[in-house]
Image (spheres, rainbow, N blue to C red):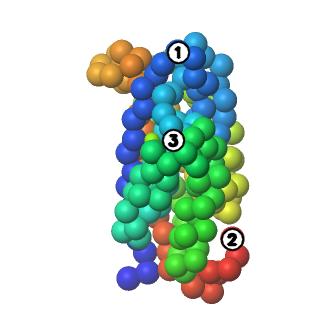
Amino acid sequence: MNLRIGHGYDIHRLVEGRPLILGGVTIDHSLGLDGHSDADVLVHTVMDALLGALALGDIGHYFPPDDPRWRGANSLVLLQQVAAMVRERGWRVVNVDTVLVAERPRLRPHVAAMAVNMATRLGISPDRVGVKATTNEKLGPEGREEGISCSAVALLVHDPDRRHGP
Ligand code: MG
């Protein structure tokens, strides 16, 4: 079997006094996501999908929230580290797909930039990174604007010859 699929899910609270950073894009909004790192819920789900595909655990294992090293961390840098782990094990990312769930602000104008940011860190072309944004029809915590959630899937192919390059 030379293919693996992984799934990731995450949610962060929306609070005052924090920047809203999704896929490495800082979006102008009155609220931002709370968290130990930059709380980039989109990038976190992609990391968990990649780790899950290889049954390597979750991001909390590699970047524990009580570790001061990851305080305010740029999640894209952590994504690059996870991508390196995948590559070192002889696997290559075929594609990633994600769904962001946020009532506000409108995210669609930013999704292309988010895809480019993550594709760059993954060493793949942006047309292999899907970023979709939906509202929750005012239902649940996302609908009440208490938080933003995200889910992701990632497909990997075994490609040991490219272990040392992107
Ligand atoms: Mg998270």
Q: How many labels does the image show?
A: 3
Q: How crowded is mark 1: few (under 14 residues within 10 Å), some or many (20 or more)?
A: few
- The residue indicated by pointer 1 is 16
- The residue indicated by pointer 3 is 42
Where 149 falls versus 32 (above or below)? below
Ligand 1, by image quadrant, is top left
Tell me the kind of residue under disc 3: Leu
Tell me the kind of residue under disc 2: Pro
Disc 1 from disc 2: Cα separation: 38 Å
Sequence-earlier tag: 1 or 2:
1
Residue at point 48%, 28% (across, down): 34
- The residue indicated by pointer 2 is 166
Residue at point 36%, 15% (across, down): 144
Q: Is residue 34 visible?
A: yes
Q: Is mark 3 within 8 Å of ligand 1?
A: no
Q: What element carries label 3?
A: helix
Where 54 falls versus 110 (above or below)? below
